[in-house]
Image (spheres, rainbow, N blue to C red):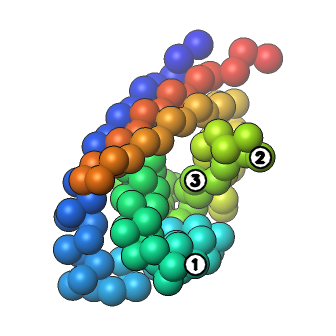
Amino acid sequence: MIYGVGTDICDVRRIRASLERHGERLAQKILSEAELATWKERSERWPDRGVRYLATRFSAKEAFSKAIGLGMRMPMTWRHCEISKAASGKPEIVLHGPLKDWFETRQLSVHVSVTDENEYAASFCVVEKNDF
């Protein structure tokens, strides 16, 4: 059964401008430790890819927060929600801390799709209630 659906579109230019103003602090606020390591690696080699990586993570986390119906309120936090990928390249959401507990208690599962082009990143998220 569908629990919630969320979508988000992010203007990559806004993320770029925020990075110019706030530097790495912006990435540290939004990204998990694993995501931050990937962001740093991409940013050093290809700065534009680093910006788009941050924008896609921002967008996916926003879409997820909408799908679970919390927005950015506890237990939903930027760093407790990690956008990872399977070996196949499929994006996956990995939850941590109180958000993971909240999600598992409700017997939910999630599907996420992420895309980006030069100036926009977009995400779509479906959360299902598992009927065991």
Whether the residues at callouts 2 and 3 have beta carbons within 8 Å, the answer is no
Secondary structure found at label 3: strand
Quick check: 12 above or below 100? below
Q: Quadrant of the C terminus?
A: top right
Q: Which residue is mark 3?
A: 83
- Relative horizontal placement of residue 59, taking residue 90 as reference (left or right): left
- Give percent across and percent down for residue 88: 73, 40
Residue 41 picture quarter? bottom right
The mark closer to the camera, 2 or 3, is 2
Q: Which mark is residue 41?
A: 1
**First reached walking from the N terminus: tag 3 or tag 1:** 1
**Residue shown at 37%/69% (left/top)?**
48
Q: Compared to 127, does 50 lie above or below?
A: below
Which circle marks residue 87 in the picture?
A: 2
The Cα–Cα distance between marks 3 and 1, rounded to whole angstroms, is 16 Å
Instruction: Give SS at disc 2.
Output: loop
**Disc 3, disc 1: CB below 8 Å?**
no
The amino acid on which the numbered mark 2 sits, given as a three-letter code, is: Ala
Q: Amino acid at mark 3?
A: Ile
Mark 1 lies on a secondary structure that is helix
Q: Give the crowd class for mark 1: few <14, some 14-19, many >=20 residues within 10 Å.
A: some
Q: How packed is label 2: few (under 14 Cα within 10 Å), some, or many (20 or more)? A: few
Q: Disc 1 and disc 2: Cα gap in Å?
A: 19 Å
Quarter of the rendering containing residue 23:
bottom left
Q: Nearer the viewer, residue 63 or 24?
A: 24
